[in-house]
Amino acid sequence: MSAATQFHTDADRTTADEPRRAFIRKALHGYEIKRDESKAAFSDWQQARDAAAAIKYEGVNRLDAYLREFEEKFTARGGKVFWASTSAQAREYIQTLAREREVKSIIKSKAMTSEEIHLNEALEQDGYEVVESDLGEFIQQLKHEPPYHFVFPCMHLKRDEISALFEKELGSAPTDSPEELTMIARRFLRRQYLKADLGISGANFIVAETGMISITENEGNARLTTAMPRIHIALVGIEKVIPKLADLALLLPMLAIGGTGQHLTCYNSMYGGPRQEGEVDGPEEFHVVLLDNHRTRLLADAQQRDALHCIRCGACLNVCPIFKNIGGHAYGTTYQGPIGSVITPHFRGLQDWKHLSAASSLCGACTEACPVKIDIHHHLLHNRRNAVAEKKVWWERIIWFGFVQLMSRPWAYRLSTRFAPLGQWLHPFLQNSGLDPLHAWTSTREFPQAATTSFGDLWRARKVGSK
Amino acid sequence: MRVTLFVPCFIDSLYPGVAMAMVKVIERLGHEVDYPEGQTCCGQPPFNSGYWDEARAVAERQLAVFRDAEVVVSGSGSCGAMFKVFYPELFAKTAQESAAQALSAKTYEFSEFLVSKLGVRDVGATFEGKVTFHDGCHGLRELGTKAAPRELLRHVKGLELIEMGEAEACCGFGGMFAVKFPQISTAMAEVKCNSIVETGVEYVVSNDSSCLMQIQGYLSRHSPRVVKSLHLAEVLART
Amino acid sequence: MSGDREAILGRIAEALREEAPRHHEHVGNGRHASAAPAFQQWLPPVGASHAARLELFSQLCEVLRTEFKHCANANAAAKHIAALAKEGNWRRIALHAGELNDAVAAHLPPTLDLMRIESGYDRDALESCDAGLTECESLVAQTGSVCVTSRSSGGRTLSVLPPHHIVLARENQLVADLTAAYAELAQKYGSSYPSFLGFISGPSRTGDIERILVLGAHGPRRLTILLVP
């Protein structure tokens, strides 16, 4: 089944599930209230967005220089940088490292890049035990299901579903308390931190100036993942680089507000190298894998380059009426929601993924919410345009050819408006027959009654009358 | 002032009363209304579908029709946004670039025209009833129109404006989206219409007839009670 | 082995030949040097006086569920810790060497076992401690955060593994905002930063299950900040 057909099937199924949609709406409504409170504390939120966009613009538009700077600084502190053009290269580097260092147990903190390159599957095939430590990711891993939302991985699950899952997979007693469920996971994962010898993380930012990566989280699982195992690997997209350490003073609050609505996330941690001399703990080795995986393809599209400003806060998903109604899994992508619809065609092929750009009412709520001012909904239009420029669909071409013929001839257009009432009179005979041209509309909604006289004709009559 | 009306194709054939109401309001305020008969469609359907060459072919027609207009007023925020925001992009680096910029500069959405250009808040309308206002997304986010229609409604005698929850949420119309993805589009309409019905109003008013086609289409089929949709101009025209 | 370095850098240079449009209209032409200092003014205001900032910090602690307490001196701080220990039946707390830590530790009751970690530690032993006692780099008024580093706060683990994190801070460690905290770090460490810098804003938390707040997801369930003059 093509990705587009799958999307239609899944979206039709999920939109029919009203209780789940209501559950998601309620959760995201709570987010909105909190986000608005945090935004209101700003002296000027719009100016702050501009400043954040300017920082990301600078990072992305001088990407080569900043990546070199990062590499130099990070390497000088004993870190190792690996540049991966493809998912395969990234996976292979990590797999080889794990083998050579005789790794036994792997703990991971949330990294969408690892979902992107299907790292867990590869490591599991090599025989490693790989455990996700972010609570939401842990739940999704137990459920053998990809994240539903790249910030809230299991936001679609209700507590009883999680309780049943834990009961089945971990043998815990059933409970309807989110606190008790969290503690079950806490107890289980504590043992994993203590025994893991490789910790794998992502990163929210790469800091060129000081050769650091920055990780934002609420739970403390990333802190433990990067503190306890003897090896730390961070798998990071190349676009994450920012020029200065102090830029984080703006970007960390923006990320928090966009993501969860908090004024600042609980743990914001910056790591510059493995354990240094005089430090009591920390990994012996720290590797940063810089992942391209078609990001340079998006970079080459100057018009849509700002999509690489994305800090993966998820704000655009949280406000998107499409996301709220179809849910995260229907997208079939690593990155869901509006930003995912913009970037996935660049990563995985425009013709195969253009349907996500079409599946939007272009309402622009995403663009309005984006803390780094990515022109998200206009890029959906650009994807549509680019897909057509690359390959036209024959029947669409016929429709739009006819449309142009009609609309560039005012007399023909005027004539067509006079036939509209006739068409509407005929419509009941065709309804539900498969020949009904309005079926896609009338299957769920009423179509308005066409006026017997168009405005153009009314106007002409009025003008004649007044002479 | 000589005001040139842009009556988008679907208003022309489905909602002529909306355009008539605009004429009435503008004339009542003492301005002259002009309607160039050569106008057809702004070209948004092919534009939104990615067929920009075809959109340009149709749009060129409108550039010619409105070339000499002093101000152009649109009864649809969406079609207004097409003129104001998307024509400059559509015609960028073409011979008509400056013509597109010129049309963009003189185009107004109806409520914005009354409030910002004419400086009018009270158009002398009377309308008995409870009303909620739906922000069309293109008007709201492409054109930044939020306060103007509410200003106008607040000055209508007898009218009670009740804001709905999530007034800024999309109704799910989105042009071709509504028929390409009818299930998603309808789910969005459901959410929107529920918040309209919850306000207890008798009328839902918008500055965009395309949204109202979706909202009324859903309400007529599914609403537990009658809520009637009206274009802002139709409310302002009543005396 | 650095992988596909040249190929990636080559593609980047090629891609960047065309300039991208800017959507951030308010900030001049975006050269970073000018954008950086500007943003402070758009962030939440922190008040001009030390007292106002202290008040803001205290308010944010409440929002974040951080326990924040003024102590008259090291002795008073030790008394507070002793009370927490008694209430929670603590047997052992872990700590690192430091001027403030040592001053407070000297007044702790002898019944409380102190595990010093500066010359290495057993992970299981640290995991079984009831609390971790650390110093910090600074407290951030604007966000209610504690800035810790691997040098100031006993490495990476002490402040996150035990179930209760106690921070000792001096009143003059309060800074206005994150920018000020970063500036201080830069001044103190120059180009030789500790390998870990972190801003801690409240005890560990999660909202992953039905977006209901649960404290102590993986890190400490409680965070206590004791401020001494």
Image (cartoon, rainbow, N blue to C red):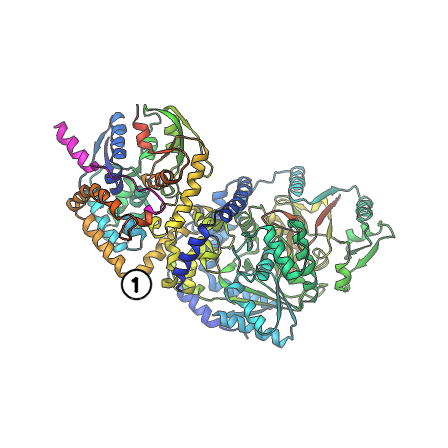
Stretch in magenta: A442-467
Quarter placement of the C terminus of chain A: top left
Q: Chain of mark 1?
A: A
Of residue A420 and residue B25, the one placed in the foreground of this image is A420
Of residue B135 and residue A440, the one placed in the foreground of this image is A440
Residue A134: quarter of image: bottom right
**In the rendering, at what x and y percent does residue B128 appear?**
37, 24
Secondary structure beneath label 1: loop
Residue A141: quarter of image: bottom right
Q: On screen, B219 above or below A230?
A: above
Quarter placement of the N terminus of chain A: bottom left
Give the residue furthest to the right.
C110
Is C48 one of the magenta-colored residues? no
Specify whether A4 is left or right of C229: left
The residue under label 1 is: A391
**In the rendering, at what x and y percent does residue C113 appear?**
84, 56
User: How many neighbours does mark 1 have within 10 angstroms: few (below 14), some (14-19), or many (20 or more)?
Assistant: few
Residue B129: quarter of image: top left
**In the rendering, at what x and y percent does residue A3 appear?**
41, 62
Specify whether B33 is left or right of A289: left
Of residue A373 and residue B125, the one placed in the foreground of this image is B125
Is A463 one of the magenta-colored residues? yes
Specify whether C204 is left or right of C37: right
Please state which amino acid type lies under the numbered disc 1: Lys
Specify whether A240 is left or right of C126: left
Give me the residue at 16% from left, 46% from top: A412
**In the rendering, at what x and y percent does residue C6 appear?**
47, 72
